[in-house]
Image (tube, coloured by chain):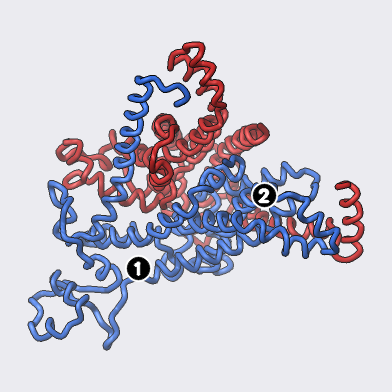
Amino acid sequence: MAAVSSPARKVYNKLAIVAVLVITLIFLSPIYWIASTAFKPRNLATTVPPTVFFDPDIAPFIKLFTKRVQMTKPVEPEVYETASWWEKRIYDGGERVLRTGDEVQLSQYPNRFVNSLIIAVTSTVLAVVMGTFTAYGFSRFRLKGEADLLFFILSTRMLPPIVVAIPMYLMYRAVGLNDTHIGLIILYTAFNLSFSVWLMKGFMDEIPKEYEEAALVDGYTRMQAFFKIVLPEATTGIAATAVFCFITAWNEYAFALILTNRRAQTAPPFIPAQIGSGLTDWTVIAAGTFLFLLPVAIFTFLLRNHLLRGVTFGAIRK
Amino acid sequence: MAVLARLESDTRAAARGWSDVTIRNLFIIPTIAFLIIFNIFPLIYSLAYSFTDFRASTNQPATFVGLQNYRELLGDPRIWSNLSVTAKYVIVSVAGQMLVGFGLAMLLNRSFPLKGLVTTLLLLPMMLSPAVVGLFWKLLYDPSWGVINYVLGLGKFSWLSNPDAALYAIAITDIWMWSPFVMLLSLAGLSAVPRHLYEAAAIDRAGPFYTFFRITLPLVAPILLIALIFRTMEAFKTFDIAYIMSTQLNTELVSKRLYKMAFQEWQTGLSSAMAYIVLIVVLAITNIYVKYLNRVKER
């Protein structure tokens, strides 16, 4: 558009850039707000007018990981003196940490976080491995009804989660997979597999066939050519696909809500469920949310050049 | 030469290792089988239940009731109100996303320092977990101390427990979350418009409106259509944020109703039937989506 630069165009261009920057700030403000709430002292979280400037406080994160009770009377000075730095922060809030023996009792959050990690990582690995093979198959070999098969594969991803969850719940109940890690891993693998096939097929199509053909001429078998020539060429694609699958599994809510409740519960159904149990401490919820969103934010930056491909299932690339 | 090499390699590879057909089947069949077992088989299972009065909360065996469930659903005014709420939600939220997303892309479609960083930052919302996004927007919407009311000077206006505002409040959150998606696709479309068309238009002294409606819009339209269909399909399925943000009956989207029917009222048979109705709608939209996706891909 900037091909012709009249003075009016230049002004328009400047205005557009200013507008973009302002809108970006507005867009980011909800994320900034949740992140800043995670570092606020409890009494500043829900003030009117909202508190913008404050001394950052690590207490919400300490509270996030520990089980605590409200104290009826102030802590004795000698106990306070001997307590470790983080425990003092909890005493400062009028609470004390629960212990069994000498062990500090952890809250449920670390457990849910680890569940999320185990389930998302395992299902990602499975979906990407299977997806890579299948994508290679679709990319290199002719198949009768190929378009229909690919549509079938994609359509399994488009199903509304609740629609699938109703029979899955009954089937998992019948075989004892409700509230297990394996149950969710299988489901997320199935959910991501279709995505991984479509995305990987786009990446595979871009690797010139001539590479393998040269290898075949040199005496490689097809399998050797796949592992030694194609896979190394596809590394970027595999990494991008894996990150997308991980984010999808990490963020998933509906299946986790329905199919887990304690042992295998992941963070997305857990974090909102903390509200409404007595007085909600928003700083702790914000801290939990912040830690949960952090990996996704980092991955978004790593993925930035592949986002378009990812959201269009590999159909549109730049 | 290439043909010759290929012919030769095929026969040699076949002699040494697995044939291409074996490898093809080995690579594709497990995935198809896995997807059939975990996506199609459950649907057959629930199709069967949709013709029964089964309730998963009791031990009573299911009895066959024929089309009773489907008849009951189609005659239930609450379902029709769920559908109209969903339609309203889809229209408001998708229209908002298209406008904001395309507008942002128009603004971003020029070079300036930090463009890459700004674009990535703008894309952040769509990567976040909808459940958690719903949760922290609840904090922003709080009537007594929420930031939104303070910034807009709305006093104690209640968003999420207000039957007239709740659906729009959820739609605003959805627009915030998914405008970046439309923006991303629009940017790809805009950057693909050939420069020389604009140069020609400038030489012909075409005004900005003419340039926009005769050059930009027609060329970006196919990709905008893809964004539109995809977002429509996703908005129709919305569950997470709506379920977390409000319990208002006026925000009872089809997915929320389905969840309540299946896992709170435990009407397994009835909800299976409803799931099938939803499924058919979604598959129809998916079909259209894939058709357009392939069309754009071919260009």
- Where is the C terminus of chain A found, in terms of image quarters? top right
B205 and A272: which is toward the camera:
B205
To which quarter of the image does residue A133 belong? bottom right
Judging depth in this view, the residue of B49 and B167 nearest the camera is B167
Q: Is residue A280 above or below residue B224?
A: below
Q: Colour of chain A?
A: blue
Q: Quadrant of residue A89?
A: bottom left
Label the red chain with its letter: B
Q: Amino acid at mark 1?
A: Tyr
Q: Which residue is pictured at 41% across the width and 41% down the height?
A: B115
Do the residues marked 2 and 1 share a common chain?
yes
Q: Secondary structure at mark 2?
A: helix
Return the residue at label 1.
Answer: A109
Residue A264, position as x, y percentages in the image: 46, 68
- B168 up-or-down from B10: above or below: above
Residue at point 91% right, 63% down? B15
Q: Nearer the viewer, residue A122 or B171?
A: A122
The chain holding disc 1 is A
Instruction: Identify the residue at horizontal 53%, vertical 43% (top origin).
Output: A308
Per the image, label 1 sits on a secondary structure element best described as helix
Q: Chain of mark 2?
A: A
**To which residue does mark 2 refer?**
A201
Question: Residue B134, position in %: x, y?
Answer: 35, 48
Which image quadrant for residue A241? bottom right
- The amino acid type found where label 2 is placed reads Lys
Q: Are marks 2 and 1 in contact (CB under 8 Å)?
A: no
In terms of sequence position, does the residue under pointer 2 or pointer 1 come before the other?
1
Front position in the image: A168 or B176: B176
